[in-house]
Every structure is written in C-alpha cells, then in structure tokens.
Amino acid sequence: MEKIKKILEEGGRNAKIYLPLVNLMKEIGEPLTIKDIAEKTGQNYELTKHRLHQLSETGVIARTKPGFYFLAEEFERFKVKSVESECVTIWSSMRREPKTNNIRIQGYNQPLARIGKKDFCIISEKDDGVMELRRSNKFFGRKIYGLYSGAFEIVISSKDIKEETLQKLTYKALRKKMSYYPREWGLTVKDAIGSENVRDGELAGELIKYGLIEKPQKTGDIKADIIFKRNNKTVYVELTEADMKNKKSSIKNNQIQARMYYGLKCNQMYKCPMVIVINENWKNSKWLQKEIAFLKSNNVHFLFTNFKENWEKEVCKKVLDFTY
C-alpha cells in the first residue's frame, strides 16, 4: 500500500481521498462498476466517476471495456486465459439495426449457441477478414445471447471490426466467417461440427489434426458438410449414410445424384475436388459404377466406407491424398 501511496503523491493526488477507493477494491477482491463503488462508499455517482478517472490516470487502477474498474496489479488474475487448440471456422452475419444503429453479429453453430448463451466473449476482426471469437468473462467481454433458431447473437462495437467492413455494413446482413476454439468452451471439434450429423463431427475431429476445418454455410453455392484446407489446397467433403438396401431405391438414387451435381459445380466454380463419402453398399450399384470414371475426371471422388469403428481414420488418410 505504501507503493500505491507514493504513486498517488507523485501524481499530485491526495492519498487520503483516493486510498479508501483502493482499499475497497482490494477488500472486495473483484472488479467493480462506478455504481457499485458509489453505493459502497456513500458518494454520489459523478464524484465517484471523477475520482476513478483520476486514479486511472495514475495507473493504480484500470478499466475494462464493459465499465469495470480493478487494481492494475491484479489484471492477470481477472483475465481469462486463452486456450490454444484446434480452431473451427463457421459462418455468421453482421448488420446495423435501423433504429438504434447498433451493430449485431449472429453466429450459426448450435453447440456453441447452447454452451455460450449468457456467457461472455471478446470478438474482433483479423487481418484476413475472419471474426475471431474468444471466451472471456463479464469483466472483459461482451455478452452472448442464445436465439430460438439455434444461433447466437452479440452486440459489438465499430472498434471490433476493420474500417473496410464498417463501410460495407448496412441494415442488410453481411456474411462473415467466424473462427473459435472449441476447447475454450468445453467442446470438441466433434461436438462443434457434428451438431446435425455425428459422422461429420467424427471425420472433422480426425481431419483437424492435419489442417483447418470450416463448416460451410447452408445457403452457399456448394452443398457440403466439411471444408478441409491444407497446404494451400481446399477439399469439399460430403457425407451420407444412405444405404441403398433400405427404403425406396429411387429416393436414395436421387440423394446421391444431388451430391454428384454439387461435386461437379464445386469443380466448375472453385476448381476444387469434392469427396463424397458413402456407404460401401453403393459399390454394388451398377448405374453409379458407370458414372464414377466420368466424375473422377471432373474432380469428384467417391470414398466407400462401412461407418464402423475407425472408419474416420481410413477416410481421413484418403482425403489427405488430395492435399499433397
């Protein structure tokens, strides 16, 4: 406390006035708002605000974005530690509100929405234009709101995004990629990607050991379950457990044909291979066997699997072949 007293005096501050505020923060042991401090000291709000501002200038206390004040020497104790782990990329949309002009961003990932609702985060736009989401707490972060649709929403500041993005922003939704680290939220890559189909998560959990994983947007030009990136190459992966032995064969045939169409479209638009992972029973399909050579010449590849134990490891090895 003598050290703080000396800092105050050297900064021209009356220690008798400001030390009680410092002692209060030390006693409470966590960041406090102006209102909290005013109530506990019996001072009015404006006077408390002024004195906290004066203390901040000396470097004795610090202020977090949401308006909490704490002793500067305890900064590391309150800050949430980042968990460096595998990163998953999902899709989000950003827009201005017509009446309030607030900027809101919605993320589309049900597992994160379920875990993260009512939690807090730090969000910012990286140099590559991707919005990065890191877990935080109420002292440093912005609140996350869960939506009935299974998405999540965050009110952000213009300081969180690049000037180029800010200029594009209107009341209409602007699509943006968003990255997050599942382990920070108590999730695995399997959880993050496999919300709609557990097989997607199983394969993604294996692929991410070797490269980057993106969850494609549902409304995109190409229908795929996983986008895998490695060695500056991109592979679109589509999975289906459709078994040709079950239900009406015409329905199953149409499902496979639809995937073939998007595979051809992927090659035409992006010059990227698409890998279609299907049940090994389809090896017996005469019409499909006739098409495989043509599709392969157009960068659309079928991988057959039984979806039994360790199937994802075998499929992963074959997908990696397209990234060398």
Image (spheres, rainbow, N blue to C red):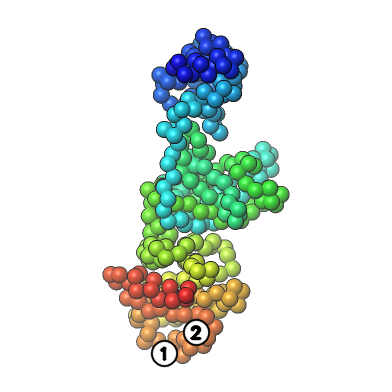
In the picture as drawn, the residue positioned furthest to the top comes out as 16
Residue at image position (38%, 55%) is 188
Identity of the residue drawn at 38% across and 73% down: 317
Q: Which mark is residue 114?
A: none
Q: Which mark is residue 286?
A: 1
Residue 309 lies left or right of residue 275; in this view the side is left
Left or right? Give the position of 129 relative to 71. right
Q: Is residue 60 visible?
A: yes
Residue at label 2?
A: 296
Mark 2 in CB contact with mark 1 (< 8 angstroms) = no
Label 2 and label 1: CA atoms lie apart by 16 Å
Image quarter (top left, top right, bottom left or bottom right) of the N terminus: top left
Q: Earlier in the sequence, mark 2 or mark 1?
A: 1
Closer-to-camera residue (52/143): 52
Q: Secondary structure at mark 1?
A: helix
Q: Position of residue 283 (x, y in %)?
A: 37, 85
Nearer mark to the viewer, of 2 and 1:
2
x%, y% of residue 9?
55, 14
Q: 170 or 242: which is nearer to us? A: 170
Q: State the image quarter where residue 74 is shown.
A: top left
In this rendering, the answer to whether 323 lies above or below 144 is: below
Amino acid type, callout 1: Lys
Which secondary structure lies at badge 2?
Answer: helix
For the point 42% across and 62% down, the residue is 208
Whether residue 166 is situated above or below residue 77 in the rendered picture: below
Q: Given the image, on which type of amino acid does mark 2 rest? A: Lys
Rendered location of residue 240, percent (x, y)? 41, 72
* Mark 2, other Cα within 10 Å: few <14 / some 14–19 / many ≥20: some
Q: Please provide percent x and percent y for residue 309.
A: 28, 70
User: Most extreme residue toward the left, as rendered?
Assistant: 309
